[in-house]
Image: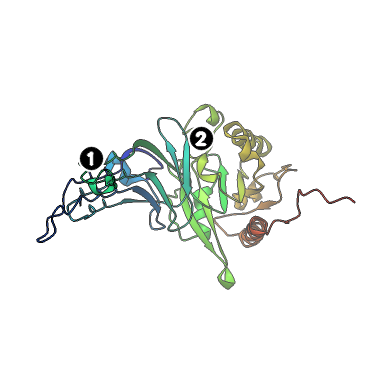
C-alpha cells in the first residue's frame, strides 16, 4: 500500500532532576555538597533510509516518545542521558509542523537527519550552587520537559523524469517496457492508483529514474478524479515527459490540457523542462498522421511501448537531457557573480 502523507505526534525525553547530597567520607568532616546534575532527555530524530519508499508504518501509530533521562546522584554523579528515538523515513520526505505549517526541513539523501523534538536539559544538583559564601547549598533544579509537537510528513518521490498523461495514455506500459518495474498493465481501460518508480538502465553503467503518476483528467486541479494529489511526486524531477496517445481524438487539445492542469496545480510545474511522447504509434497505420505543436517542449518523440519503435532514441534523449540538468545543478557558481566591479 502506497502512503505518501502522515501526521504523528513526537515527544522528546524529559531531563533528569539534579540531586541534593553531601560528601560523607571518613576523616573528612563537612565534606561539602556533592549532588550531581540530571542527564539530558533524548531527542526525536528523523533519518532518511533508501530502503523505504512509503510512509505506511506511520499510519499505524500516532505517538512516538524518546527516552527520559536519569536523575543526578551523590558523589557528583551525572544522571544517564535519555536514548534518542530515530525514526526512518523515505528519501524525499518533507517535514512540517502540523499546527503552524512551518517547514522544518527535508531529507533528500541517504543518512540525512533532522531533529524534530529536542530533549529537555537536565537540572543542576546542589554542587553547582556552592560558592565561598554559600558552602552548604540545598538548592537543586528539576529537569526540563522535552519538546512535544505534532508533525506532518509528506513524501515527494525523487526521480529524474516524470511521466504525465491522461488515464490509459500508456504510462504504465512504457514504465514496464524500459525499467524493471512491474506496474499493472492490461488491455482494458483503468487508471493507476498510486505512483510507481523505475530505473532505466543503459549501456556503460548509465541510468536514470522515472516516476509514473496516476492519470490527469480535465479539472484535476479542482479536485476531480484523483485530483492532483500525486503531482507532488514530480515537483523534484529534472524533466517531464507528457504522454499524448496517437489515437487521441484531439492530440493538440490533450497536450494543452496537461499543460493547463500542471499550471493550475502549481505554476512552478509549468517551468520544468518537458518533452512530448506520442504513444501508441503502432496504431498509426490505421490512424491519420498525428499533428501536434509543442513550441515549449525540448523534443517530440513518436514511440510505441508495445513494439519498441522509437523507444531507444527517446530514452537516449531523455538521458542526455537529465545529464545536462545534473551538470547545470552541480556547476560551481561564479564567485564574482553579482559583485559590483571596482571602479577607480
- Check the image and report above or below for 177 versus 43: below
Q: Is residue 226 left or right of residue 277?
A: left
Q: Quadrant of residue 29?
A: bottom left
Residue 323 seen anywhere in this rendered image of the structure: yes
Distance, label 2 to label 1, CA atoms, is: 59 Å
- Check the image and report above or below for 2 versus 27: above
How far across and down, in percent of the image, does residue 284 sit?
65, 49
From the image, tell me which residue sits under label 1: 139
Q: Quadrant of residue 121?
A: top left
Front residue of 249/20: it is 20
How far across and down, in percent of the image, does residue 130 sit?
27, 47
* Residue drawn 38% across the image and 58% down it: 51
- The dot on residue 321 is none
Q: Is residue 322 left or right of residue 66?
A: right
Q: Earlier in the sequence, mark 2 or mark 1?
A: 1
* Residue drawn 66% across the image and 41% down it: 271
Q: Are marks 2 and 1 in contact (CB under 8 Å)?
A: no
Q: Within 10 Å of the Cα at label 1, are there few (<14), some (14-19), or many (20+) other Cα atoms?
A: some
Dot 2 falls on a residue whose secondary structure is: loop
Residue 249 seen anywhere in this rendered image of the structure: no
From the image, tell me which residue sits under label 2: 228
Amino acid at each position: 500500500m502506497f502512503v505518501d502523507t502522515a501526521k504523528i505526534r513526537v515527544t522528546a525525553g524529559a531531563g533528569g532532576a539534579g540531586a541534593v547530597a553531601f560528601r560523607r567520607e571518613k576523616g573528612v568532616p563537612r565534606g561539602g555538597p556533592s549532588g550531581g546534575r540530571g542527564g539530558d532527555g533524548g531527542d526525536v530524530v528523523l533519518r532518511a533510509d533508501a530502503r523505504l519508499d512509503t510512509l505506511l508504518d506511520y499510519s499505524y501509530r500516532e505517538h512516538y516518545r524518546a527516552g527520559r533521562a536519569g536523575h543526578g546522584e551523590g558523589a557528583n554523579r551525572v544522571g544517564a542521558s535519555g536514548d534518542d528515538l530515530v525514526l526512518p523515513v523515505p528519501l524525499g520526505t518533507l517535514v512540517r509542523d502540523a499546527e503552524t505549517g512551518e517547514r522544518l526541513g527535508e531529507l533528500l539523501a541517504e543518512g540525512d537527519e533532522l531533529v524534530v523534538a529536542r530533549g529537555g536539559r537536565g537540572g543542576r544538583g546542589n554542587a553547582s550552587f556552592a560558592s565561598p559564601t554559600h558552602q552548604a547549598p540545598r538548592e537543586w533544579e528539576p529537569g526540563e520537559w522535552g519538546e512535544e509537537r505534532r508533525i506532518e510528513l509528506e513524501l515527494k518521490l525523487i526521480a529524474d523524469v516524470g511521466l504525465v498523461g491522461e488515464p490509459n495514455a500508456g504510462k504504465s506500459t512504457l514504465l514496464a517496457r524500459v525499467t524493471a518495474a512491474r506496474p499493472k498493465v492490461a488491455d482494458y481501460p483503468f487508471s493507476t492508483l498510486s505512483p510507481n518508480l523505475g530505473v532505466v538502465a543503459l549501456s556503460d553503467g548509465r541510468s536514470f529514474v522515472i516516476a509514473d503518476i496516476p492519470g490527469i483528467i480535465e479539472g484535476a486541479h479542482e479536485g476531480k478524479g484523483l485530483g492532483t494529489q500525486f503531482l507532488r511526486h514530480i515537483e523534484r524531477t529534472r524533466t517531464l515527459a507528457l504522454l499524448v496517445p496517437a489515437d487521441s481524438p484531439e492530440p493538440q487539445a490533450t497536450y494543452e490540457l496537461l499543460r493547463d492542469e500542471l499550471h493550475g496545480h502549481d505554476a512552478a510545474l509549468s517551468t520544468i523542462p518537458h518533452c512530448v511522447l506520442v504513444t501508441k504509434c503502432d496504431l498509426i497505420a490505421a490512424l491519420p498522421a498525428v499533428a501536434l505543436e509543442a513550441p515549449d517542449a525540448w523534443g517530440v518523440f513518436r514511440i510505441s511501448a508495445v513494439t519498441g519503435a522509437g523507444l531507444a532514441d527517446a530514452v537516449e534523449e531523455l538521458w542526455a537531457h537529465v545529464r545536462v540538468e545534473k551538470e547545470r545543478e552541480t556547476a560551481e557558481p561564479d564567485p564574482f557573480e553579482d559583485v559590483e566591479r571596482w571602479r577607480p
